Image: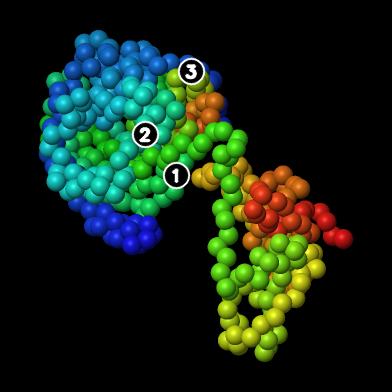
Amino acid sequence: MKPGDELPPLTIPITRTLIVAGAVASRDYQDVHHDAELAREKGSPDIFMNILTTNGLVGRYITDHFGPRAVLRKVAIRLGAPNHPGDTMVLTGTVTDVDGETARVRVVGANGLGHHVTGTVTVEVPR
Amino acid sequence: MTPTERDATLYGRLVAYEGRAAATAGVGKDPVNLPMIRHWCEAMGDAHPAYRGPEAVAPPTMLQAWTMGGLAGHTGRSSAYEELFALLDAAGYTSVVATDCEQEYLRPLRPGDEITFDTVIESVSRPKTTKLGPGYFVTTRTDVRAGAELAGTHRFRILKYAPASRPPKSPDQAPRRPRPVINRDNAGFWEGVAAHRLLIQRCGDCAALRFPWLPGCADCGSPEWDTVEASGAGTVFSYVVMHHPPFPAFAPPYAVGLIELAEGVRMISNVVGVPYDKVRIGMPVRLEFVRADEELELPVFRAGGEG
């Protein structure tokens, strides 16, 4: 791995099931992540993915690429456009720094509305 | 109180919570366990071998999940955190959305690990206008421990906001540009606009030109004035491109120009006739008037027109 390396994109269909399953698996029962009617009352057109699920998907994207020995050290993400059901998110990543066995990867997750997530992941890949 | 004064008062009360504990010796509802790890991996589609089998560790990104209150809610949150949220709720900022999560993983979490955590309220932002509605960003930092050992840190930012009402969609109710505030000090300017004349004030004593319209001269203090009509020629002195947040009747991205008129005064206006990303400092522009709706005309500047 070297700076400038681009990770193959990962396309994730944003289904209602994924949003609800991710919310429940992360113990997040905020109504906006499972109840469309209450989400609309709060100004959102539909339910949307919670940040813990986005965090989990970003982590998975990195370890899927770097393989079974990869260990996440830091994940820092910022959310922008929400992930609503029916949309598709494409995760892309670029290696920005490499220090020995540790790489920093800039990650962007784009959906139909724009950038859902931007962030930086530090991953250690022991040889 | 005006809304601005109310915000200032509220901000003063909110910011007092910076540095206070949001949770002290919070306890994870479940010890780290394989079923929750498996449910997480299933939801995320994560097949990493480290998260399975007898030597399994938890996916590091689950860090926050072990501290969640779940359907029954949080226990062990401090009164400071409850008070901060109550203040925001009472002021109408009733909704929550998470915006940032920064985690560092120091030690893997394994099945059987008992989780404890301490959270501090790191910062409260000034009032912000967002696409979701007006609100305040609240940032917390949590230390997550397995037994006595620090396993990870978790900085989390949420927006606590007042949901914006959805703008009406029917064309006859399309949002209109804001109305200018017209008073005795600037009525002459708007009368000029109505007659398609851009009028600049001129001091009756020292003859300094001034814009926007003001009751007195900034140079000599004289209240005497008359007007001169702008020729309409100008250049882009500076500009910004507005991306966010979107306001009713404005479709971002668009350029907002600071136009230097040939007479030497500057005014803020739209630059039209050129894409927002092609506006440049020094670009020559020419005054024109656009009708925004049946009640409102506005002076704007068209790019490229020297004559």
At 20% across and 24% down in the image, what residue appears?
A: B71
Q: How many angstroms separate mark 1 from mark 2 (CA)?
A: 14 Å
| Rendered image quadrant of residue A85 | top left
Q: Chain of mark 3?
A: A
B172 sits left or right of B47 in the view: right
Q: Nearer the viewer, residue B153 or B208?
A: B208
Query: Residue B36's image quarter?
Result: top left
Q: Residues within 10 Å of mark 3 (few under 14, many from 20)?
A: few
Please determine if labels 1 and 2 lie on a single subunit: no
- Quarter of the image with the C terminus of chain B is bottom right
What residue lies at 44% left-to-right and 44% top-to-bottom?
B130
In the rendered image, which residue does mark 2 sit on?
Answer: A42
What's the chain of the residue with tag 2?
A
The residue that disc 1 covers is B130
Residue B218 lies left or right of residue A38; in this view the side is right
Please name the amino acid that badge 3 sits on: Gly
Whichever of labels 2 and 3 marks the residue nearer the N terminus, that label is 2
Question: Which is nearer the eye, B287 or A15?
Answer: B287
Q: Position of residue A123 (x, y in %)?
A: 39, 29
- Residue ID at (74%, 56%): B289
| Res. B111 mark | none
Image coordinates of residue A40 in percent, x first then y, are 39, 29
Check chain identity for marks 2 and 3: say if they share one: yes
Amino acid type of the residue tagged 2 in the rendering? Lys
The three-letter code of the residue at mark 1 reads Thr
Where does the N terminus of chain B fall, quadrant-wise? Answer: bottom left
Q: Which residue is mark 3?
A: A86
